[in-house]
Image: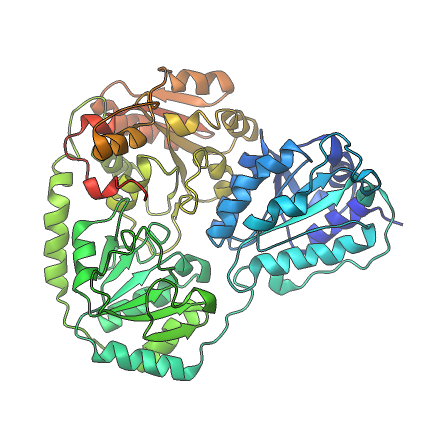
């Protein structure tokens, strides 16, 4: 009769899990034995991370790109606390991730055994669902529940605690999986037809309707439907930081709106709108500039979201359309089969060019350390349309989100926006590579972020994955310092020592490229991307406080 650990691995294989990202520990010996020695385990690639947070970020990036649940695991005690940040990010970013923690035996519960921790209480605030499998017969059913909850409705993170005696004891429970829980979205709920009728009527009645597209476009894989609807109805599309690139280079794409990478003219267009079609986005603080845009609350809102509880939160909604975004956009297209708005595409293009001009003038700047605009322009020059950019939330995030040219609709941009955790990009490129092995995968990080995950460079070398990491090296938490300067012209607690990260990378087994002039940047990046293995490009970059014209609205401090 199989033990609980074998039942766990069989359950993962039944859910078509191909990769598990994790870290070994005392409590996980039984799980690792099942992964190494069973037939089901042979179907799964275990990816050893250097800490549990890195494993969770790998699973998150894998899930975002593949449309399949990402799976991460770690041991008890500190392993559980380290897994927490990634599950919190995935849950609030609507990413289907299943977190597994082995833990101390049930029979020792409450006795103060080393690393004992109430994992269900710990993970309750940051997951959709979590449980403890206190008997081996419960393992298959709880695994099914973890995958169902992670992928159903509004996706998110789930967590399952697995005591050592549960994994060691025998079980005869049946192992099976629902095919629907192996991909996301599981189902595509259809909106009530009357809500689509009302939404179409309000859009047709408006003079200047605008679409605000959120991360739900990626979750629903509704890229084609969004672009077709926008270009048919001739509606401008503003993107949030989580939907960057969703509509590609459509003439109706406005780019990012709001704070942190927002384009001024895109915000102007949103303010001018008399109706906003919110497509898979929450009414959150960033794209609304802390709920200040649109300013007068007179703008009508048509809100489409798979989660009915998200509709009407913060802004009064004229028409609520609860359902899958792809289905809803197809339904609206059936009801609106031609242009409905007074927007002029040529006027929008002129606004875009006027906004872009001062940045374009710096695309070939010879300043060194490098200007951020040159950093983006060089990437535009070197990388192709298949590239996947995985960005930490510092300097690279707003500059690349706003200025990089995403030509093909789809998911080519990953960044942790729910909680802005540093250290996402380097482990994230691992998950991105396994999800999309034929793509060019580039991680964008700062030296501040890299300091939180330096050990993950060894992971890249050991796995020999063909990914590139670009390091913005300015010897400080530059983005935070720029915010301090904007807030009260001070600088405190943001500087650290210099390092040659190309040399560090080379010591750990990567190809390291150190940029020593503006003219050498593009060549170094091209060599790194062409290298058949992991590479790192160390780019000395101008600290943001040294730049006179950092867009102030990108640096607004939180309230």
Q: Quadrant of residue 522?
A: top left
Whether residue 435 is visible here, answered yes or no, is no
Q: Position of residue 533 (x, y in %)?
A: 47, 29
Tell which of 294 and 280 is nearer to you.
294
Q: Position of residue 536 (x, y in %)?
A: 40, 26
Q: Quadrant of residue 284?
A: bottom left
Query: Left or right of 75: which side holds 298?
Result: left
In this picture the colour scheme is rainbow
Whether residue 266 is visible here, answered yes or no, is yes
Tell me the residue at 18%/70% (across/down). 208
Q: Position of residue 322 (x, y in %)?
A: 44, 72
Q: Residue furthest right?
A: 1
Tell which of 269 and 438 is nearer to you.
269
Using the image, determine if residue 312 lies above or below residue 104: below
Tell which of 347 and 552 is nearer to you.
552
Say which quadrant the C terminus sits in.
top left
Using the image, determine if residue 511 lies above or below residue 238: above
Q: Position of residue 341 (x, y in %)?
A: 18, 73
Tell me the residue at 70%/31% (across/down). 25
């Amino acid at each position: 009769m199989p033990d609980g650990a074998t039942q766990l691995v069989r359950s993962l294989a039944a859910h078509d899990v191909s990769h598990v990202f994790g870290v070994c520990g005392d409590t996980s010996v039984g799980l690792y034995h099942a992964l190494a020695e069973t037939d089901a385990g042979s179907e799964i690639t275990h990816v050893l991370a250097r800490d549990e947070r890195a494993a969770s970020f790998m699973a998150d990036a894998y899930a975002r790109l593949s449309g399949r649940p990402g799976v991460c695991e770690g041991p008890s005690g500190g392993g559980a606390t380290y897994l927490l940040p990634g599950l919190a990010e995935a849950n609030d970013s609507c990413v289907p991730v299943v977190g597994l923690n082995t833990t101390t035996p049930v029979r020792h519960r409450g006795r103060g055994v080393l690393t004992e921790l109430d994992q269900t209480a710990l993970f309750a605030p940051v997951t959709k669902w979590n449980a403890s499998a206190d008997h081996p017969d419960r393992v298959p059913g709880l695994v099914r529940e973890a995958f169902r909850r992670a992928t159903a409705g509004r996706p998110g993170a789930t967590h399952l605690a697995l005591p050592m005696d549960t994994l060691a004891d025998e079980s005869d429970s049946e192992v099976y999986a629902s095919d629907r829980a192996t991909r996301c979205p599981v189902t595509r709920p259809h909106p009530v037809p009357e809500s689509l009728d009302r939404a179409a009527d309000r859009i047709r009645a408006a003079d200047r309707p605008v679409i605000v597209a959120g991360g739900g476009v990626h979750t629903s894989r509704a890229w084609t439907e969004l672009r077709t609807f926008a270009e048919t109805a001739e509606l401008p599309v503003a993107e949030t930081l989580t939907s960057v690139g969703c509509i590609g280079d459509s003439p109706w794409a406005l780019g990012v709106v709001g704070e942190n990478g927002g384009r001024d003219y895109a915000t102007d267009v949103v303010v001018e709108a008399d109706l906003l079609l919110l497509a898979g986005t929450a009414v959150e603080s960033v794209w609304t500039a802390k709920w200040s845009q649109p300013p007068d609350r007179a703008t009508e809102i048509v809100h489409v979201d798979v989660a009915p509880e998200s509709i009407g939160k913060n802004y009064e909604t004229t028409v609520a359309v609860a359902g899958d975004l792809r289905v809803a956009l197809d339904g609206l297209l059936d009801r609106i089969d031609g242009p409905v708005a007074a927007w002029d595409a040529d006027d929008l293009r002129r606004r875009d060019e006027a906004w872009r001009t001062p940045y374009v003038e710096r695309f070939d700047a010879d300043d060194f350390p490098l200007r951020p605009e040159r950093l983006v322009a060089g990437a535009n020059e070197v990388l192709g349309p298949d590239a996947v950019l995985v960005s930490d939330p510092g300097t690279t995030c707003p500059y690349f989100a706003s200025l990089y040219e995403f030509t093909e609709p789809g998911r080519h941009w990953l960044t942790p926006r729910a909680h802005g955790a540093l250290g996402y990009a380097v482990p994230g490129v691992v998950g991105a590579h396994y999800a999309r092995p034929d793509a060019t995968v580039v991680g964008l990080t700062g030296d501040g972020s890299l300091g939180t995950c330096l050990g993950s460079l060894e992971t890249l070398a050991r796995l020999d994955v063909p990914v590139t990491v670009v390091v913005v090296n300015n010897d400080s938490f530059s983005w935070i310092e720029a915010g301090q300067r904007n807030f009260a012209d001070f600088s405190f607690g943001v500087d650290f020592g210099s390092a040659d990260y190309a040399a560090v990378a080379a010591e750990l087994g990567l190809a390291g490229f150190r940029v020593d002039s503006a003219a050498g940047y593009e060549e170094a990046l091209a060599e790194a991307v062409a290298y058949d293995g992991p590479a790192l490009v160390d780019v000395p970059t101008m600290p943001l406080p040294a730049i006179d014209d950092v867009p102030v609205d990108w640096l607004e401090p939180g309230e």
